Image: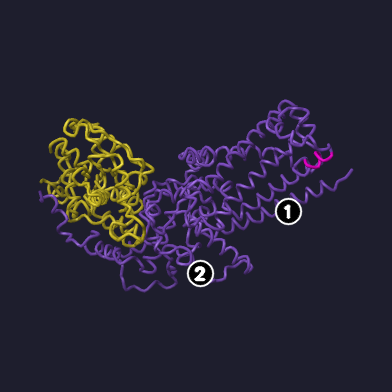
Amino acid sequence: MNYISNVLFGVLLIIGIGFFLNNIQKLYRNIKLGKSINRNDNKLQRLKNMAMIALGQSKMVKRPFSGFLHIIVYVGFVIINIEVLEIVVDGLLGTHRVFQPYLGDAFYGFLIGVFEVLAALVFIAVVLFWLRRNVSNIKRFLSKEMTGWPKRDGNLILYFEMVLMSLFIIMNATDTAFQEAGVGNVVSQFVAPIFESYSPETIHTIERTAWWIHITGILVFLNYLFYSKHLHILLAFPNTYFGNLNPKGQFPNSEAVTKEVQLMMDPSVDPYAMPEEGAEEDVPEKFGASDVADLSWVQLLNAYTCTECGRCTSACPASLTGKELSPRNIMMKTRDRLEEVGRNIDENKGTFKDDGKQLLNDYITPEELWACTSCNACVEECPVSIDPLSIIMDMRKYLVMEQSAAPQELNMMMTNIENNGAPWQYNQQDRLNWANEE
Amino acid sequence: MNVPTMADMMAQGKQPEVLFWVGAAGSYDDRAKKISRAFVKILHAANVDFAVLGTEESSTGDAAKRAGNEFLFQMQALMNIEVLNGYEVKKIVTCDPHSFNTLKNEYPSLGGGYEVFHHTQFIQNLISEGRLEIDKTTLKGKRVTFHDPCYLGRANEVYESPRDLIRRLGVNLTEMKRHKGTALCCGAGGAQMFKDAEKGNKEINILRTEDALETKPQIIATGCPYCNTMMTDGIKFKEKETEVVVKDIAELISEANGL
């Protein structure tokens, strides 16, 4: 027997999966660069959210057309991948359609039939997606951040899917025995006649070639994920699980600040007291975020999960009125910077070497940050529970608390709050005057 | 008008059933003061035993926090909590969704746990308890659209209380295309109220006003003093002041009931 193809397949599989696992490790390391935040409470609610939002696509269908197309691609992707299991076993053992005898012709035929129908539907959906991206004037695909690589990336993924689905159908169409059996070739029977004029050997060669390119394509796609915006097919699940469970209007209170304020307000504290001998000096925490390591790991996971669909930006009042801010771009820039930091760590044997850059200014500008109205439209829109607003707020905190770099009018507003307990310059003693003014 | 303070109440040894948190806009802004007075009229009409902090009230710190000044926010919060806890306040009602959100969500972990209501929720309760009825005839048939305040709607998912009250007015409620979860912000939140907008091609409040005008309303109903300002400015900009008025739901109820 000739084992060359089995060995070749095994090697291909090991390289493909090995490379993928290596990248996943890097991804995990990069996410762990973020600060700790407890998202392990209320596990039941978290599971429920994951089941509803990621598995059940509950937020995707808020926009019915793209939501429907997405569900086809999603269901198709998940179900057709069951077939990959057989392909892998066939490849390793040198068998052909190894499950057929075990499942029986009727059931096997039914399964493959379902896969074929789904593959055809996915193909159609992906073509429509391509048209939406490239032909229809859909504003969120035409924004400034969607030029260059992000645009190519989006299209490349669609081409990948078109090719993989076509190969799956061609592979079945040129499987003479499968066509003759006539069970499950629901779609491929219409493609088979194209190859009728070829010799049986040629048809077999086409079948083998399609089979090999198909599985190789899947492994390449798996590895492409890490370099593309497409990680959401994996990360949507943890991302929805670890999402924020509090009301959207509730912004976290910084505990370090609470300690300081309490100390300030406590009349029994001696302001001139020296720290006790041996007492640990409070390490002054950096307030807010100026770089990716100042964000929480959930915010970094958010950045990797973003698939750049732009629903956030299409609902953002600042984006809608032509401001520089785009919540999608906040996520994209956060990821870009995080990957830059990751590469830096790779190049410097596991430690980050200061590169004189940071997320603030080098990627995200104060102008973007100050344009946000904190209205939560982006958070509400995101189909996978990403929270761009939290990053904007953390960066504002840095600007104000570390750099005193608020816009002048906001400084005046804050001075007024400090002086007279209102954002405007009114006397606190006049606070009840409204009651007697009619 | 009779607006008792907590200090008065305490001097008389009384504890009101609810504290009315007026907020900075409701206290100082000429337009928003009318909303405060309209709400007080409703409280009186329903015989609600309430009080305000008066000169002891101070900014909740919402704007400071959203502007990035966590320190100032917590100073304000701890000061207010000290006052509120000193008066043993349990229940708070406010016409300002920003105060509502901050008091309800951000004060508890700093030691201030209260039952907090937006005035539309509170009025809804008064009605279900039989303490207040809304006159259906005065505004009957008027075309009304409701602008969801972000800090009431998306931030706290209160969408029905204001709509329930509007329907009770007997008016014709027409929703804007973007409403409830997809409502567009008026442009004031996140401390934007206190600064000029960044460079763009339009003001947010104009875009939102256009959303509202699409419904051909006679009244744009709001539930937030800041939204009210933004929408009122938008209507002025569009030169529609003669056809469209911007009113808080409390004002509409007070007007309908002839208070």
Q: Chain B is which colour? A: yellow
Crowding near the residue tagged with mark 2, few <14, some 14–19, many ≥20 C-alpha atoms within 10 Å: some
> What element does badge 1 sit on?
helix
Q: Are marks 1 and 2 on the same chain?
A: yes
Q: In which chain is the residue bearing label 2? A: A
Residue at x-position 31% and y-position 46%: B210
Q: Amino acid at mark 1?
A: Ile
Residue at x-position 35% and y-position 44%: B183
Magenta highlight on residue B15: no
Indicate the chain coloured purple by its letter.
Answer: A
Relative side of B146 to B40, left or right: right
- Mark 1 → mark 2, Cα distance in angstroms: 35 Å
Q: Amino acid at mark 2?
A: Lys
Q: Main secondary structure of the magenta part?
A: helix
> What element does badge 2 sit on?
loop
Label number found at residue B91? none
Residue under circle 1? A15
Q: Position of residue B110 (x, y in %)?
A: 34, 54
Which contiguous range is marked in magenta? Answer: A201-206
Q: Position of residue A3 (x, y in %)?
A: 86, 46
Farthest right residue in view:
A1
Total of numbered circles in the picture?
A: 2
Quarter of the image that includes the N terminus of chain A: top right
| Residue B111 visible in the displayed image | no
